[in-house]
Image (cartoon, rainbow, N blue to C red):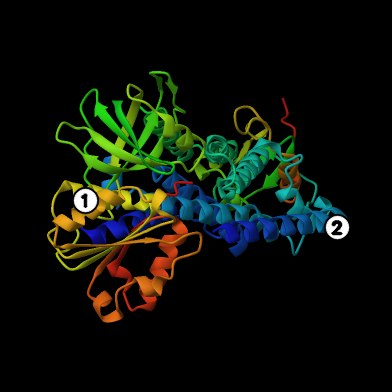
């Protein structure tokens, strides 16, 4: 595995190469600055989109190389939006090139009407990217619909490459088109259709708090390789009187058994996970993973763990895996006692392990007063801090820790927002 | 990122609308304004201009000196240069998968017109 620093640089370097490669290949000579800029922006946007497609693949080996699935998705989003801006500027720069002499030619260059299929495909591609990104940011759309709307971005990429083919540029575009189709097909077949996932069977389902069920999964073939603190992507199907939604969702692993059995904590956050609260033993499932590395490679220094709601699950998995080797404070925040999953078990573990100090707080409906919950500044500065919970809570805790003088490299966190 | 998306999209449509409005109200580029002396150019003379930096092409009976435009052509030089110094109407009409160039390309081509191809004597 690459070192942490190399991993941090892996994705930016990959995106730089995928952007600079096509732009260098198409580097114009002797053209006006605006026309040159338009051409470079088009190729750079195309390269960035291909890099972005690679980052949407959900493969354990790839996520290990590139520093984790969360980093990959974060850069997938960044690359996508930067490519979109570059591709919007591409036709504008080409059109504006002839603007000072012939404004009419500028419009003829840009117009989707009467310009042949090359320009029409370019426009269709841009409109699909525009539509796909608009839906990407619409978080209120149900996940099932959102996934398909988001897929329109992939069609937009293919149409953009079709635009280049129509311009008669076949030499590098045909391999790029093949690569784009390979990446899209890979994602669809291996990840969305579940070919990369392993077959499991639900053998237990235990409600552990309001709207939280812990599901035990027994492998039917070779089990996945996962560590405590990681998450897996699971789809539940129809069987034993239950009809699962068949969509892959990320869930934190709460324990890993010696026989390959894993347990996951599932909180009712949407239609699919709400339905899973009534799952029963015997339901078939497919499991892919494990992913995530934010709790891996922890140094042997004093630690502070902050968990919000179901975000406590990866910490529970670590504690279940064995006794701690460094003094650790776990601050567990939940709305009310009825919502506090694993609380009784955590209290038992804390009583048995002198290195674990548990602070459990019911916050009610108001945001917690973090300043009063965090250890004193001097004590805090020497700790490695790990945060897991809802995005708003993670953001608030990060701000509070920085205000207390904790540097960014000592703050580790993980978001589960895959949209 | 959401803010960047909204701002970029809004600026894009604003600029497209500006180019469309001004472009539609402005007079079209007049190909006749480009110097295009109507001289007759024999095939033998056409054939002498078959280099990337000295490239004449005969398209639909009209000879064009496209040397200055070649670097701007979206295709690779290997696609276009072989047609320098030749009658290239068929290539022009069947650009990609048998489709002709656009009306805009026709207009652009007219700016490089230098004469008419002289008819071959039997």
Q: Is residue B20 left or right of residue A250?
A: right
Q: Position of residue A324 (x, y in %)?
A: 14, 57
Please tell me the numbered disc located at residue A200: none
Q: Secondary structure at mark 1?
A: helix
Please determine whether, in this image, residue A146 is positioned above or below residue A326.
Answer: above
Q: Position of residue B56 (x, y in %)?
A: 64, 45
Q: Position of residue B89 (x, y in %)?
A: 68, 33
Mark 1 closeness class: few <14, some 14–19, many ≥20 residues within 10 Å: many
**In front: label 2 or label 1:** 1
Q: Are marks 2 and 1 in contact (CB under 8 Å)?
A: no
Mark 2 closeness class: few <14, some 14–19, many ≥20 residues within 10 Å: some
Chain that bears disc 2:
B
Residue beneath the point at 59% across and 42% down: A141
Q: Can residue A259 be seen at all in this image of the molecule?
A: yes
Q: Can residue A1 be seen at all in this image of the molecule?
A: no
Label 2 sits on residue = B26
Label 1 sits on residue = A318
Chain that bears disc 1:
A
Q: Secondary structure at mark 2?
A: loop
Please state which of residues A109 and A127 is positioned toward the viewer in this rendering. A127
Please state which of residues A384 and B105 is positioned toward the viewer in this rendering. A384
What is the quadrant of residue A172 in the picture?
top left
């Amino acid at each position: 595995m690459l070192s942490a620093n190399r991993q941090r640089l892996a994705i930016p370097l990959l995106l730089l190469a995928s952007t600079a490669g096509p732009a260098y290949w198409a580097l114009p000579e002797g053209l006006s600055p605006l026309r040159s800029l338009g051409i470079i922006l088009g190729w750079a946007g195309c390269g960035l989109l291909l890099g972005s497609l690679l980052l949407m693949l959900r493969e354990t080996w790839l996520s290990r190389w590139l520093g984790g699935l969360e980093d990959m998705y974060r850069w997938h989003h960044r690359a996508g939006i930067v490519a979109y801006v570059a591709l919007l500027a591409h036709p504008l720069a080409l059109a504006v090139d002839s603007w000072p002499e012939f404004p009419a030619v500028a419009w003829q260059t840009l117009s989707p009407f009467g310009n042949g299929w090359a320009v029409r495909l370019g426009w269709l591609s841009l409109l699909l990217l525009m539509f796909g990104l608009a839906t990407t940011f619409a978080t209120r759309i149900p996940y099932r619909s959102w996934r398909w709307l988001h897929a329109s971005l992939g069609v937009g990429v293919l149409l953009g490459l079709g635009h280049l083919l129509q311009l008669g540029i076949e030499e590098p575009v045909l391999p790029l088109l093949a690569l784009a189709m390979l990446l899209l097909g890979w994602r669809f077949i291996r990840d969305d259709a579940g070919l990369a996932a392993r077959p499991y069977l639900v053998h237990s389902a235990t409600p552990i708090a309001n709207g939280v069920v812990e599901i035990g999964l027994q492998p039917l073939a070779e089990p996945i390789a996962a560590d405590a603190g990681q998450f897996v992507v699971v789809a539940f199907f129809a069987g034993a009187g239950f009809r699962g939604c068949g969509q892959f969702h990320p869930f934190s692993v709460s324990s890993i058994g010696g026989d390959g059995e894993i347990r996951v904590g599932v909180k009712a956050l949407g239609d699919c996970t709400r339905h899973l609260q009534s799952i029963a033993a015997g339901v078939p499932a497919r499991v892919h993973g494990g992913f995530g590395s934010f709790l891996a490679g922890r140094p042997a220094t004093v630690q502070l763990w902050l968990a919000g709601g179901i975000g406590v699950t990866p910490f529970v998995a670590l504690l279940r895996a064995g006794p701690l080797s460094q003094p650790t404070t776990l601050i567990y925040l939940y709305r009310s006692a009825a919502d506090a999953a694993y609380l009784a078990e955590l209290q038992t573990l804390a009583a048995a392990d002198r290195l674990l100090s548990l602070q459990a707080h019911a916050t009610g409906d108001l945001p917690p007063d973090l300043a009063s919950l965090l250890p004193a500044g001097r004590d805090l500065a020497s700790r490695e801090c790990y945060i897991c919970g809802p995005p708003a809570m993670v953001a608030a805790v990060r701000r509070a820790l920085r205000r207390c003088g904790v540097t960014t490299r000592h703050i580790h966190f993980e978001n589960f927002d895959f949209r | 990122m959401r803010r960047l998306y909204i701002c970029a999209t809004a600026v894009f449509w604003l600029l497209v609308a500006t180019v469309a409005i001004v472009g539609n109200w402005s007079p079209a580029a007049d190909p006749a304004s480009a110097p295009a002396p109507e001289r007759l150019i024999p095939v033998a003379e056409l054939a002498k201009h078959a280099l990337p930096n000295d490239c004449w092409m005969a398209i639909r009976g009209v000879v064009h000196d496209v040397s200055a435009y070649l670097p701007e052509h979206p295709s690779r030089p290997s696609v276009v240069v072989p047609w320098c110094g030749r009658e290239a109407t068929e290539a022009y009409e069947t650009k990609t998968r048998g489709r002709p160039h656009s009306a805009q390309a026709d207009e652009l081509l007219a700016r490089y017109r230098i004469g008419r191809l002289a008819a071959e004597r039997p």
